[in-house]
Image (cartoon, rainbow, N blue to C red):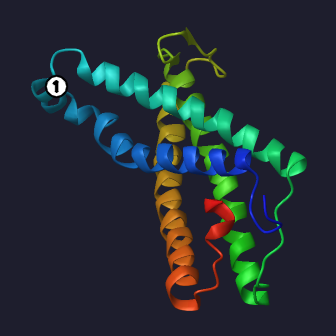
Amino acid sequence: MTTNTYSRTRRFLHWSIAILVIAMIPAGSIFTDFDNRAAIEATFGEGSFGFFYDMHKSVGFLVLFLMVARIAMIFIHPKPDYDPELTKPEKAGSGAVHGLLYLVLIAMPILGWAGVSAFDAPLPVFGLFDMPAILEKDRELSRTLLDWHEIVGKVIIGLVVVHIAAALFHQFVKKDGLIRRMLG
């Protein structure tokens, strides 16, 4: 590992979470909108809506687990030095976007977990086991929490776009090799 490259573990977590989150954006919009149930089942077969919705919940739990692991890795494998050094505005922007991404990628699955718990629906994890409910049944609270889940999803989309745009800017405009930190 070079001094300005993230550890393999941190790179694995970054790219795993990135792939899952990018996949969850359309899945969350399509497969958790109950108005789409008939169209989903007409396209993919009877019971497919429930399957996709359960997969959405399962992947959400996986993202939460991976984010907790990612936070732990900050202490085990510190962030490498920038080479070349970022400007003060770049450091501030990078810190803000990364901090907000960490926050919303923890908040998003917790809001989903809480919303589904308050709805009193199952919380499956890839058909292996169910997560426990973290709230008592309260349909009104469930709707509020799931509305916030959707709002946070839109915030995630915006932050992901900014994050990718910044990486592309460094790669193709500044040509400073910053992207190598996460590619290895």
Quarter of the C terminus within the rendering: bottom right
Residue that appears at 48% across and 14% down? 122
Question: Viewed as shown, does residue 50 lie left or right of 69?
Answer: left
Residue 85 sits above or below residue 180 on the image: below
Whether 28 is drawn above or below 42: the answer is below
Q: Is residue 89 above or below residue 74?
A: below
Q: Quadrant of the N terminus?
A: bottom right
Q: Is residue 42 depicted above or below 152 in this figure?
A: above
Name the residue: 54% across, 39% down.
145
Name the quadrant containing residue 130. Answer: top right
> Left of 25 or right of it: where is 117?
right
Q: Is residue 138 visible?
A: no
Q: Nearer the viewer, residue 183 or 18?
A: 183
Give x and y (percent) for residue 56.
Answer: 43, 31
Report the amino acid beneath label 1: Phe
Q: Nearer the viewer, residue 70 or 61?
A: 70
Residue 76 position in % (x across, y down): 88, 46
Name the element at disc 1.
helix
| Label 1 Cα crowd, 10 Å radius (few <14 / some 14-19 / many 20+) | few
The residue under label 1 is 44
